Image: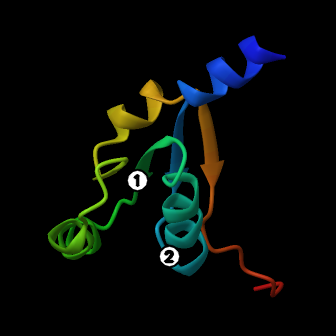
Amino acid sequence: MASIKHNLDQALVCVVGLGYVGLALAEAFSKSLKVIGFDIDSERIGKLSRNNKNRSLLLSNNPKEISEANFIIIAVPTPVTRS
C-alpha cells in the first residue's frame, strides 16, 4: 500500500477545461499533486496565470502539455438540449 501512495504522490494530473468546474478541480488537486490546467482560450490562461501563485499548478494552452499527465480529467461544457 505504501508504494501506491508513493506513486500517487508523484502523479501529474491534467484538467482540460478551466471553467467553473475545471478550475475548482485543478485548484483542489494541486493541494496535494502537481497539476496542469489546460484551456484552449489563451486570454483565459493569461488572466489566470497573472494571478496564479500556486507552484503546483501549471496553466497552459499548449496541447502538448496534456501528454505529460498520468491522469486526464475532462471538464468542458456539455450541451443538454437536442439542438
Residue at 18% over, 68% down: 46
Colouring scheme, one of rainbow, by chain, secondary structure, one colour = rainbow
Residue 25 is drawn in which quadrant? bottom right
Find residue 53 and report its horizontal and vertical position in percent: 24, 64
Residue at 28% over, 50% down: 55
Closer to us: 63 or 6:
6
Q: Is residue 70 left or right of residue 41?
A: right
The residue where tag 2 is placed is 19
Please state, as top left, top right, bottom left or bottom right, where the N terminus lies in the image.
top right
Answer with mark 2 or mark 1, whichever residue precedes in sequence: 2
- Given the image, on which type of amino acid does mark 2 rest? Gly
The residue where tag 1 is placed is 38
Pick out the residue farthest to the front. Answer: 2
* Other-residue count near label 1 (Cα within 10 Å), few / some / many at <14 / 14–19 / ≥20: many
Residue 48 is drawn in which quadrant? bottom left
* Other-residue count near label 2 (Cα within 10 Å), few / some / many at <14 / 14–19 / ≥20: some
Find residue 44 and report its horizontal and vertical position in percent: 28, 74
Find residue 27 and report its horizontal and vertical position in percent: 49, 63
Q: Is residue 80 left or right of residue 14?
A: right
- Given the image, on which type of amino acid does mark 1 rest? Phe
What kind of element bears circle 1?
strand
Residue at 76% over, 16% down: 2
Whole-angstrom CA distance, mark 2 to mark 1, is: 10 Å
